[in-house]
Image: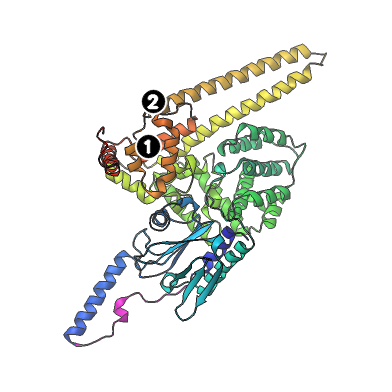
Amino acid sequence: MNVEQILKTKLPELKIEVAPSTNISDRVETKSGLFGKALSKAAKLADQAIDGIGSVSIAKIYVAPEIPDGKLDAAIKKFAPNELSNNIIGIIENSLVSAGSGMSAGIVFFGDRLFFKGELEEANEILYRDLKGISYDADSESVDLSTEVQSYTIEATLLTNINKEKFVAMLENIVTLAEQGAEFKQKDQTKPLESMDDSIKIAYVKLMVNYALSDDKKISGDEYAEIMSFVSRIQLPVEARTQIRGYLSGETTDSTEELMTQLEVEVPSGSFDIVRKSILKDLLVLLDVNGDLQSWHDDDFISAFKVKEQITDDQVTFIVDSIQKNKDILAKRMTDTQIEKSLKDLVAKGAAVGVPMLAVYFSGTVGVSAVGMTTGLATLGLGGIGVLGLSSMFTGIGAMALLGVGSYAAVKKFVGQKEVENNKQRELMLQEIIKNSQRTLNFLVEDIQYITGRLNEALKDTAVNGAKIKKLAAELSQYVSGAKSVSSKLDDAEKEAEIANLPMELDIPRLDELTKQASRKSVRSFVNSMYPDGKLNIDESLDKLRTLNTIFEKIGYFKLATATGAKLSGIAKQAFATGGKEDEQ
């Protein structure tokens, strides 16, 4: 096991499930008389205050990807200001008073180091490669960590309701890795399939092709369209699509076992269980193309896959239910209120059978990408992490989903923006489907042109009716080329429309002020990348320009009140930082 696997496996096992009374009134000895009554009243008032802000010193353990954005922000701000929140593997929180989404005491784990701090203390940082020994003091119930140059003590208060023996054993496993010369690296802990390496995407799609070929050695038109829609949704580049095009013929295929082994090696550690459940979901989607979703028990390929990957019947049934519920959003024209209820129901059922929502939405759903689905849900006040297991931890363009439950709601309230219409989520999904369909059409056109070219080559040696067939093929190629040209012009027009709504020059102080939170760090990086030297790069892709518009809208870049306040604050900070030399501002 590597360090990520150790932490993701062992951290959830550390918490001791206890239910001690946190009521101060229960701890106060009952006394008679005026003093006794006053003491009891004060204790009850204290209980009411505690109930209002949280519980006293109760350990909370969070493991990626299910770490709330507020905890990520607090971990970066108070524990590890020079690190990235999307690289956090796990958190043990043991704040004296846990209020809201903040965190004042605990332990934060990355792929190459940990940080810990007590209340009103500075954070300590320890690299795993430097660890030499771990010991537990039974008297003080503290844990000592030693390196060649320094010793550290994690006090018992940071390990309240934590199984200290298991905690020590977990750290000892990491020390063993260090002694074996393991290389410790930080990695992004939460990525949808569309943000992963092309080799992972290719293996994933090949598994879908294997399934489509499994029954009759052929791929039907509907299956082909679904696979190509999937290829579009996960943004497979041209070079990778060329490999898939050849694989679709079925002449040469990799075994399912080989492809799964490849994925297990290449997928970020700790995420493979999510990946295999997601693969099963997409195999079931292909099964549904032929209207046989409910008869999955009778499908030999799916039955063998679920057994091999240790997926239970209850989990398959839940995934089938999730596919149907996502189809119902469009088919039944569900309102935002109905969608919210449906998704919360899914969350509860998924937790009961052990299928995280990230597995259901890892590759997107019903023609909508994972990022697109999450971003849409943010407009409902449903943060990605709370519903789908997807949060601001997305990097690159996926970071537009940063404004989950609290932050986006706060922005709406601050600028006085009206609540979105009750069918907004369905509308956004349809827009995503249209965009995906347009890309899919382009891919199909490319394939037709490719096949047509091969046909033309084969027909060169045909004597009988050769000229007629060649002419028809040329006409077909022209029609296809014309369709692609129209599609290309449509893309160009959409791109120009996006550019028309974007500022040509970036107001850097305003952006810095609007993206100062830790969870928006990747967003600021993305915006800056779109504005080299402070000017918009109009040669960027349509998808990135759309993303840029979405980010500006959600952080309030264009809103007068927000923009003005951010601008003034940003200028003031710059002036202060440079000793008042910002006269030109």
Left or right of 283 on screen, residue 387 = left
Mark linked to residue 500: 2
On-image quarter of the N terminus: bottom right
Q: Which residue range is magenta in the image?
A: 16-32
Percent position of residue 64, x then y: 50, 56
Percent position of residue 23, x then y: 32, 75
* Residue 353 in view (yes/no): no
**Three-letter amino acid code at disc 1?**
Phe
Instruction: Determine the residue located farthest toward the left in the rendered image.
Output: 34
Percent position of residue 494, x then y: 46, 26
Left or right of 415 on screen, residue 278 = right
Classify 160 as above or below 271: below
Name the foreground residue: 420 vs 384: 384
Left or right of 61 on screen, residue 173 = right
What residue is disc 1 on? 552
Quarter residue 178 falls in: bottom right
Callout 2: few (<14), some (14-19), or many (20+) C-alpha neighbours within 10 Å?
few
Classify 274 as above or below 352: above
Quarter residue 121 falls in: bottom left
